[in-house]
Amino acid sequence: MTAEIPLDGLGAQSLVDLALERIRGDILRGVLRPGERLVEEQLTRRFGISRAPVREALRLLGQQGLVEHLPRRGVRVAELSADDITELFGLRDALERYAVETALVTTPDPVKLAVLEEATERIERAAREDSALDRADAHREFHVALVDLAGHRHLLRVYEPVIMQLLLYMAANMRREAEQRSPAEGARRHRRLYETVASGDPVAVLAALATHGAQTYLGPELEH
């Protein structure tokens, strides 16, 4: 059963953040499935808060690509077609390649590189603890930190909804992913990619990105 949100002493923005994290967590854990309707009244009763923070949380989740606002039909968890997934993986790869090519013109920023290393360590902890939600969060943090190495604010703004929508697809296919490889293997792949980035060799990083393994999330209907 989902724990109650503690409300004492929380301001309006804190309530938005808590509602956002709770709904987002349920989506990425697969508790809320693609296409499932999200009814404001039910969410307010569940969280014990007013509609305003829930509505704002749903608006922000829409910006992240995790929910869809449909005219006269309300809000639902986003659904992605086979074409959507193929396009998103392709866009993610293109944006990451551009970020790496931009970032590694010079020596990687040590502060941003440290953030990438922290995300790598979090992926490893989540793999040891077998926490699906922590793995999803750490995966997002890693790839956002990778793109952030470029120091390109507008690139990051374009990239974040892409990785978030891919996490939605990955959450929906977590069982298939678990059958194909263990969380420990995923952690090792991210460690190798981090170490390649830390080496500062753009050619090696681009080669590592090309074999990073995102396409193993694809089901038979999407594989080429």
Image: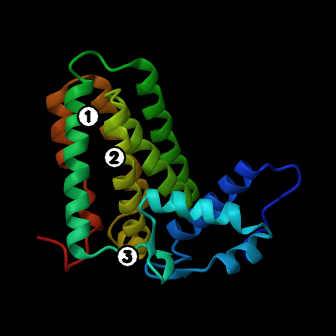
Amino acid on which the number 1 mark rests in the picture: Ala
Q: Say the numbered circle drawn on residue 79.
A: 3
Q: Residue at x 33, y 26 (%)?
A: 198
Left or right: 25 in relation to 114:
right
Residue highlighted by disc 1: 99
Task: Please identify the residue farthest to the top as the structure is shown.
Answer: 106
> In the rendered view of the protein, which quadrant contains the C terminus?
bottom left
Circle 2 or circle 1, nearest the eye: 2
Q: Is residue 151 above or below residue 163?
A: above
Query: Counting residues from the N terminus, which is met first, the one under dot 1 or under dot 3?
Result: 3
Left or right: 88 in relation to 164:
left
Cβ atoms at labels 2 and 1 below 8 Å apart:
yes
Amino acid on which the number 3 mark rests in the picture: Glu
Residue highlighted by disc 2: 159
Cβ atoms at labels 1 and 3 below 8 Å apart:
no
Q: Secondary structure at mark 2?
A: helix
Query: Counting residues from the N terminus, which is met first, the one under dot 2 or under dot 1?
Result: 1
Left or right: 209 in relation to 71:
left
User: Circle 3: is it few (<14), some (14-19), or many (20+) Cα within 10 Å?
Assistant: some
Task: Please identify the residue farthest to the front as the structure is shown.
Answer: 72
Q: Residue at x 31, y 38 (%)?
A: 155
Q: Say the numbered circle drawn on residue 13.
A: none
Residue 41: x and y in percent read 69, 79
User: Circle 1: is it few (<14), some (14-19), or many (20+) Cα within 10 Å?
Assistant: many
